[in-house]
Amino acid sequence: MSRSAPGTPFGERRDAGSKRVVAIAVVVLSALLVIVGQLWYLQVLEGGHFLDASDKNRIRVRPVAAPRGILFDRNGVPLVDNRPAFTLSLIPRELDRDVERRDAVLGRVASLLQIPFEDLVGAIENVRPESFQPVRVRRGLSLEEVAKVEEWKLELPGVIVEVEPQRAYPTSRFAAHLLGYVREANDEQLKQGRYRRGDMVGQTGLERLLDEFLRGRDGGEQIEVDALGRPIRLIRETEPQPGAQVVTTIDRRIQEAAERAMDGRAGSVVVMDPRTGDVLAMVSTPAFEIDQFTGTIDRAAWVRVIRDPMHPMLNRSIQSAYAPGSVFKIIVAAAGLQEGTIVPTDKTHCTGEFHLGAWTFKDWKEGGHGTVDLHRALVQSCNVYFYQAGLKIGGTTIAKYARAFGLGEPTGIDLSGERPGLIPEPKIRKGRGAKTWYAGETVNMSIGQGQILVTPMQVARMMSAVANGGVLWKPRLVQRIERPDRGVVWSDTGKVMGHVELSPMVWALLRRSLWGVVNEGGGTGGGARLPGIDVAGKTGTAQKIAKSKAEKGEDHAWFAAFAPANNPEVVVVVMAEGGGKGGQVAAPIARKILNAIFLEKVATLDIRG
């Protein structure tokens, strides 16, 4: 019987054990390699990411809003300034990811501050949940509201109160249409890519025109916080860069005086320097409350403003066009004298009526003015004289001179929405259905009625040309823009848009007659007479559309003046909507404004007298 090799079973067992050891070693080594690889991945490849995430858990980046640039008047007095204000903001990254718990926080905020819950939810819906940028939901919190938020702070994660610069105005309606208002960028502006959500942007007026200069560059702070989000220490700070300083042409004292003079009336005042085209004041009444639009305005309040029949959002100085009434007689006189169609000695006997075919045109004065020449016709604003003069001159010539004085076209002022007005083209048209220009239309045109439409700003520029000898300036609102680190970055020296060519004798006659309107017996502008200062001007009473539902009530009252008459420094144009007669309403308003402008001179003369 053969015997198996000694030790064979033991050798087999040893080989099997060795294999198991090797297998285990391979598994352990593989696992070790995986762990080492994962550690290398986490620490080397993803180390920066996790370090950043760790920092974000303890470091809060808080933007610091840059103060908006200040608008100054021509004398260095602020027209609008900044003041610190409290703003309620939400930080999406710190809000709870669970919708129910997040809504509970937002619900408490809504209850504490009486903010619609839907507004809070809507504010963060379009923002990335991991964003640390504050989403501003309400500006202008009161101290009481701030105290409520601070009292519940530990139960309001992601809810903070920031201090930001906010616009401050002398009064709630001061220069509302001129300055404009600032609000958060709307959806349309956000689509432009120039603004971030929550940025304050100029929406109207100078705030809109100069927004790129007035907006500064925001700074920021990196703050270490504890587990409850409470600040521990400031790590790094970047100072905000304020917006540029703007020096306007406005005189705040004159602007305030014009607003006081127009208090309670609808209409417009424009005060201009005829030597430079500088706008010293621009008033449109009624005005809107700027503060109401700068802060959070609810839909009901917005609808009330938009539907207000007095249209407080409308800038009547440039966005409303009216018949000029007898102010237009300056144009008719200039056209007739320059063309030689009329001469100063031409006389007309005014009985109070003028007959043209079957039509009868009335004078404003019952019984008429008697026999008048051109000078007396301007002083007393005799309609009958100008009816006849207009027919002699012709509608085409009158229209030509009206356009030469800048009427019927935009003045070029750097504000949006300016209307061009209308100077009709009195040509006889041929062809079927064509409208013929009738003599009666020339008669109406001769006293500033009919189809003619002008803005108060156009009348101010026209009157400036009369005062300065024919120079048509582009109305100027901004003198220069300055930055603290760069000095003057933009300036405007003024721009001449045209020149009215009249002989020196015509200019002299016009100015002498306009002086008589205010200072001679029987002059319609006596209400603007100012002791110590020679005022020259022209009244106007513009009839409304007879059958228009929107144009019922009194006529529009005009008065356009310059002073001192022999060396004009200012032009004042007043237009009172539905005011009645220009001499009774608009001229006294202009007197108040002129009195404020020349207050020091008048006071000195009174003391010496």
Image (tube, helix red, strand yellow):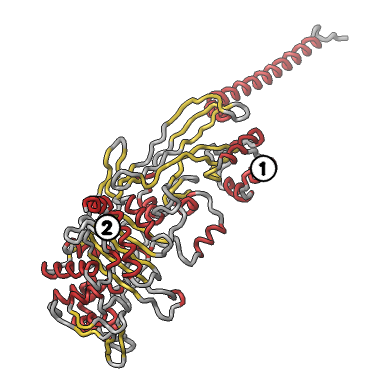
Of 421 and 157, the residue lying toward us: 421
Query: Crowdedness of circle 1 by 10 Å Cα count: few (<14), some, many (20+)?
Result: some
Q: What is the CA distance from the residue labelled 1 to the residue labelled 2?
A: 54 Å
Identified by mark 1, the residue type is: Arg
Q: Local crowd at mark 2 within 10 Å, few (<14), some, or many (≥20)? A: many
Picture quadrant of residue 255: bottom left
Above or below 596: residue 386: below
Instruction: Identify whether 466 is placed above or below 225.
Output: below
Residue depicted at 31% across the width and 82% down the height: 366
Left or right? Give the position of 419 relative to 150: left
Residue topped by disc 2: 272
Mark earlier in primary sequence (1, 2): 1
Note whether residue 501 is visible: no
* Place of residue 344 in the rendered image (x, y in percent of width and height, measured from the top left): 14, 77
Q: What residue type is labelled 2?
A: Met
Q: Residue 445 occupies which quadrant of the picture?
A: bottom left
Residue with the mark numbered 1: 108
How many numbered marks have been drawn onto this rendered protein structure?
2
Name the element at disc 2. strand
Residue 101 image offset from top left, x and y in percent: 69, 40
